[in-house]
Image: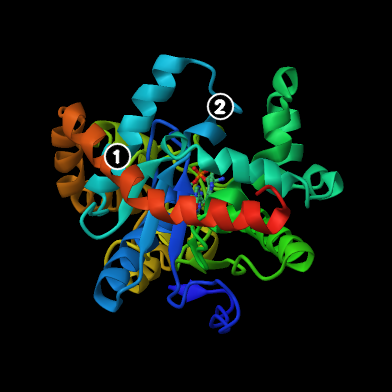
């Protein structure tokens, strides 16, 4: 686990929490892929366990308000929200150790988003890489939510005064913007929010099966870790490896082969596997088959847990409702303070 800069301890005069607090959000995108797990969810779980041992809070949120910038089918949104809750719990989030909730169940965050909008120059938002990307990928639907998306993300984090934010590298520009917004707010209204810091895993950028772009559902290059083994096998067998290795007898270059890179995270013998590739002792197909089997085996318990959880929506709703209730006091306290500071009460 790498924290990009150590958070500053709270000064006595400020209203910052004495303990660090961790927060992260994830879209209800319908599939939990390897990029989500290696890049972020592993750290959600690690921080949750550290928080439970060291006495700090960890808060995880399924960001359905954010999803509305691209998903416009209510039934799909509801279904995918529950699927994401089941996935996160199956992958190790424990509602007794962390607080897991759905963003829209604590609607105070939309009020805070509006308030933060008033300290955020439009130029910062127009320069955000994801906004520019969405303008290209959904040109028929460049809604205002896409522009203000990072402000809502900042509100998510700061309403809980979180200073540790486990994310993948693709979220770094958003987090940087959150920090700018915090500085702008604190400069205008006094020290209110801590600056959030990214927490990265050993795999902050996971490439997709094409070996070129970040693994992402919207690109369609995912490895769906909780899917049936046959689906996973097919996805992994379709992976692009070292494009210069044409013949089975050609030596491979593990440092540029995405399959070899993924072996780093599934077993401690990756150097041996890399050696087999370099010497052409093994071919790409062998290395892919081995990776597929390891990923299938690694996620077998989570796959089983997911099946049980998704079959019990009443239990999932209860967990999510309880999560939203447990964080209510933190959200309400921050909002009371912010309204006071801004002259609204
Ligand atoms: P989202 O739903 O796209 O992704 C969830 C988490 O998974 C990480 N991730 C990856 N990491 C490495 N390699 C990949 N290929 C990969 N794909 C996804 C993401 O970096 C992320 O950590 N805007 C956010 C959700 C959000 C949020 C927040 C995050 C809303 N509010 C507040 C942190 C704090 C998003 O769309 O993540």
Residue 133: percent from left, percent from top: 72, 37
Specify whether tag 1 is near ligand 1 (CB below 8 Å). Answer: no
Instruction: Give yes or no for contact between labels 2 and 1 (Cβ–Cβ under 8 Å).
Output: no
In front of the other: 252 or 328: 328
Residue at position x 52%, y 68% in the image: 163
Residue at position x 42%, y 46% in the image: 61
Residue 269 in sight: no
Crowding at mark 2 (Cα within 10 Å: few <14, some 14-19, many 20+): some
Q: Look at the image and tell me in which quarter the N terminus lies.
A: bottom left
In front of the other: 338 or 146: 338
What residue is shown with label 2? 68
Residue 74 in sight: yes
What residue is shown with label 1? 320
Task: Tell whether 123 sits left or right of 288.
Answer: right
Reply above or below: 189 against 99: below
Give the image quarter of residue 229: top left
Helix, strand or loop for disc 2: loop
Task: Tell whether 162 sits left or right of 80.
Answer: right
Q: How many marks?
A: 2
Residue 66: percent from left, percent from top: 56, 35
- Camera-near label (2 vs 1) is 1
Residue at position x 43%, y 56% in the image: 330
In front of the other: 125 or 258: 125
In front of the other: 66 or 162: 162
Helix, strand or loop for disc 1: helix
Q: Distance between the residues labelled 2 and 1?
A: 19 Å
């Amino acid at each position: 686990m790498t924290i990009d800069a150590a958070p500053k301890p709270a000064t006595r005069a400020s209203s910052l929490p004495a303990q660090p607090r961790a927060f992260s959000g994830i879209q209800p995108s319908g599939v939990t892929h390897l990029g989500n797990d290696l890049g972020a969810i592993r750290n959600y779980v690690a921080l949750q366990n550290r928080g439970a041992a060291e006495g700090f809070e960890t808060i995880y949120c399924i960001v359905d308000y954010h999803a509305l910038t691209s998903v416009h089918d209510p039934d799909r949104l509801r279904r995918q929200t529950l699927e994401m809750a089941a996935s996160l719990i199956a992958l190790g989030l424990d509602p007794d150790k962390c607080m897991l909730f759905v963003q829209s169940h604590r609607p105070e965050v939309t009020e805070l988003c509006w308030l933060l909008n008033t300290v955020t120059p439009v130029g910062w938002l127009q320069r955000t890489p994801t906004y520019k990307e969405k303008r290209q990928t959904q040109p028929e639907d460049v809604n205002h939510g896409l522009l203000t998306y990072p402000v809502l993300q900042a509100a998510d984090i700061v309403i809980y005064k979180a200073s540790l934010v486990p994310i993948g590298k693709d979220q770094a520009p958003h987090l940087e913007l959150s920090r700018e917004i915090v500085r702008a707010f604190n400069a205008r209204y006094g020290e209110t929010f801590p600056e959030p810091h990214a927490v990265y895993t050993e795999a902050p950028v996971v490439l997709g099966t094409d070996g070129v772009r970040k693994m992402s559902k919207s690109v369609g290059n995912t490895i769906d870790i909780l899917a049936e083994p046959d689906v996973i096998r097919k996805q992994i067998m379709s992976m692009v490896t070292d494009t210069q290795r044409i013949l089975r007898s050609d030596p491979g270059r593990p440092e540029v082969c995405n399959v070899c890179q993924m072996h780093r995270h599934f077993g401690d013998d990756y150097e041996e596997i890399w050696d087999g590739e370099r010497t052409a002792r093994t071919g790409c197909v062998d290395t892919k088959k081995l990776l597929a089997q390891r990923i299938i085996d690694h996620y077998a318990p989570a796959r089983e847990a997911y099946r049980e959880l998704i079959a019990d929506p009443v239990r999932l709703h209860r967990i999510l409702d309880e999560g939203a209730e447990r964080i209510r006091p933190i959200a309400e306290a921050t909002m009371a303070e912010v309204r006071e500071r801004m002259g609204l009460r």
